[in-house]
């Protein structure tokens, strides 16, 4: 059985849905690396170091989870970390088409790396970072959707920019 899995994402910000997928992956693999991606095509609210810190603080209770960031091709990053599996979360059927295409492309680029899809708890299937940011930007309560330290940072960001 593969022992190292990589869970990539922008995590801008980290949500409870992301955490649920991380915890599920940690129960299945000997080591999980949560890899915060540098996306040049996305406008991020939080910096890479902020996002890495969010994840690191949130997974500190999971002994087999590490946090890193990367800005290379995902399959190349997975190889450098000795990973065998890419973990992706699927919330709904709407995620499937994009994730399926990415999994097939990654398989074409590196046939030895598998992609495994994990579904979060049903209470998180509607949750996305984009929705959380929208709620926070309008002064709504995001406490049910993100860890407390992320909620605090969201409030601080939107107070500054308000």
Image (tube, rainbow, N blue to C red):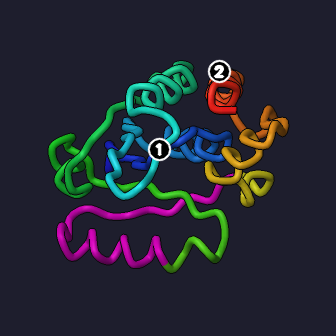
Determine whether the residue tagged by mark 2 lies in a helix, strand or loop.
Answer: helix
Q: Is residue 112 left or right of residue 66?
A: left
Q: Picture coordinates of residue 38 (x, y %)?
A: 32, 45
Q: Left or right: where does residue 69 sit relative to residue 73? A: right
Instruction: Give the position of the C terminus as an image quadrant.
Output: top right
Q: Say few, some or many: other residues with alpha carbon within 10 Å of mark 1 (under 14 / 14 to 19 / 20 or more).
A: some
Q: Residue at x 35, y 51 (%)?
A: 39
Q: Residue at x 47, y 23 (%)?
A: 53
- Contact, mark 2 vs mark 1 (Cβ under 8 Å): no
- Name the front one of labels 2 and 1: 1
Magenta residues span: 98-120
- Residue located at (44% from left, 49% from top): 9
Indicate whether 17 appears above or below 107: above
62 over 113 or under it: above or below: above
Which of the 4 image quadrants contains residue 70? top left
- Residue indicated by mark 1: 44
How busy is the neighbourhood of tag 2: few (under 14 within 10 Å), some, or many (20 plus)? few
Pick the front one: 41 or 70: 41
Relative to 123, say whether 44 is above or below: above
């Amino acid at each position: 059985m593969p022992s190292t899995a990589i869970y990539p994402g922008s995590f801008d910000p980290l949500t409870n849905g992301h955490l649920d997928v991380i915890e599920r992956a940690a129960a299945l693999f000997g080591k999980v690396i949560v890899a915060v991606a540098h996306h040049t095509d996305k406008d991020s609210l939080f910096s890479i170091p902020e996002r890495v810190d969010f994840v690191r603080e949130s997974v500190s209770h999971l002994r087999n989870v590490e946090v890193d960031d990367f800005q290379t091709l995902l399959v190349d990053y997975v190889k450098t970390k000795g990973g065998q599996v890419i973990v992706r979360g699927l919330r709904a059927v709407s995620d499937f088409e994009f994730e399926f295409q990415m999994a097939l492309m990654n398989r074409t680029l590196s046939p030895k790396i598998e992609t495994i899809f994990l579904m979060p708890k049903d209470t998180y299937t509607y949750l996305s970072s984009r929705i959380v940011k929208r709620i926070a930007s309008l002064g709504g309560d995001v406490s049910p959707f993100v860890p407390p330290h992320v909620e605090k940072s969201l409030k601080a960001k939107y107070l500054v920019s308000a």
